[in-house]
Image: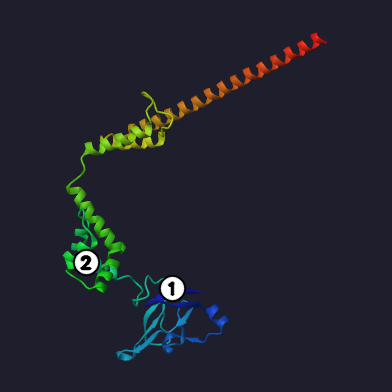
Amino acid sequence: MRYEIVSGKEYPVYSRKEADELGLSYKHPFDVSEGDYGISSDEEVSVCLKRSQMKGGTLKVKYPWGPSFVRSGEDDIKSIGRINNYTESGKNNRGKFVSKSDNFKKLAHLMAQPGMTKKAAIRLVFGHLPDNKRYSLNKTMRMEVFRRMVNDELDKIVEQFPIGKMDTARALAAVLDRAMDWDGDKMGKDGDSKIAVSILDKLMDMNDMKSKGRVITTHQIEASTVEHTLADIKEKKKLFKATQTEEKHGLEQAAEKKEESDKEEA
């Protein structure tokens, strides 16, 4: 069982098996009255919310999964795979309207401007609106299609007023300093070689160093860093082992001296 929300109210949608287990009586939507149960072509069962006669004998029936037009008991009624439950096809035609609307194009352009607010942009394009209209506009502005329109406008602004190469390079260099955690002219103990290599890669891109050599150089830098790290670990292991051996020998010598002293006293 699943639920569909229509006008703020939840309606259960059963599978045919669930409906049979509950003892529900259902028919094809063409033969069902309002308040009775109908079954879709996808074998889902739910209550008929509205049934109205149209010209030419066509019926418009509304179920929790959406409205449909039926002309006979043989027509297909789709309930699964619908993007929405308020259009006959279940397709999202609202997005097409938003993308082609001059008012929404203006709104997207304004929303991309620095310091612009939703409230101010809506007032500039649509004037003063009642609360219900403003609420509907806010919902539309949250749609993916409108967000893409705003992003497109932002891209146009960036192309028109690009950030300078030097500004970007300085920012990357500052991040590189933090990633390297410099200890003199070497990477410090808190340095991150992966981040450093990534930043170097971006800086090289900015300087048009795009070639096979760039990739090789990057790999060499990373390999060299890893190699030094492994060498440090090996050196520390050797040092630890030598220290451990010396301490052990020291304990053994102390034990031998104590045994000799005990023998002399005896």
- Mark sitting earlier along the chain (1/2): 1
Which residue is drawn at the image coordinates 30% and 34% (left, top)?
A: 173
Residue at the top extreme, as displayed: 264
Inspect the image, locate mark 2, and give the three-letter code of the amino acid beneath it: Lys
Amino acid type, mark 1: Ile
Locate residue 135: give its quadrant.
bottom left
**Which residue does the image show at 42% across and 27% down from the upper left?**
224
Q: Badge 2 local density, few (<14 within 10 Å), some, or many (20+)?
A: few
Q: Quadrant of residue 60?
A: bottom left
Q: Position of residue 151 (x, y in %)?
A: 26, 55
User: Which residue occupies the extreme front position in the image?
Assistant: 265
Picture coordinates of residue 3, whole percent (x, y): 46, 74
Residue on which disc 1 sits: 80
Image-quadrant location for residue 76: bottom left
Q: Left or right? Give the position of 150 relative to 41.
A: left
Looking at the rendered structure, the secondary structure element under dot 1 is loop
Q: State the mark number for residue 100.
A: 2
In this view, the residue in front, 168 or 52, is 168
Residue 141 in percent (x, y) is at: 27, 64
> Tag 2, which secondary structure?
helix
Residue at image position (39%, 30%) is 221
Q: Nearer the viewer, residue 247 or 70?
A: 247
Q: Nearer the viewer, residue 131 or 107?
A: 131
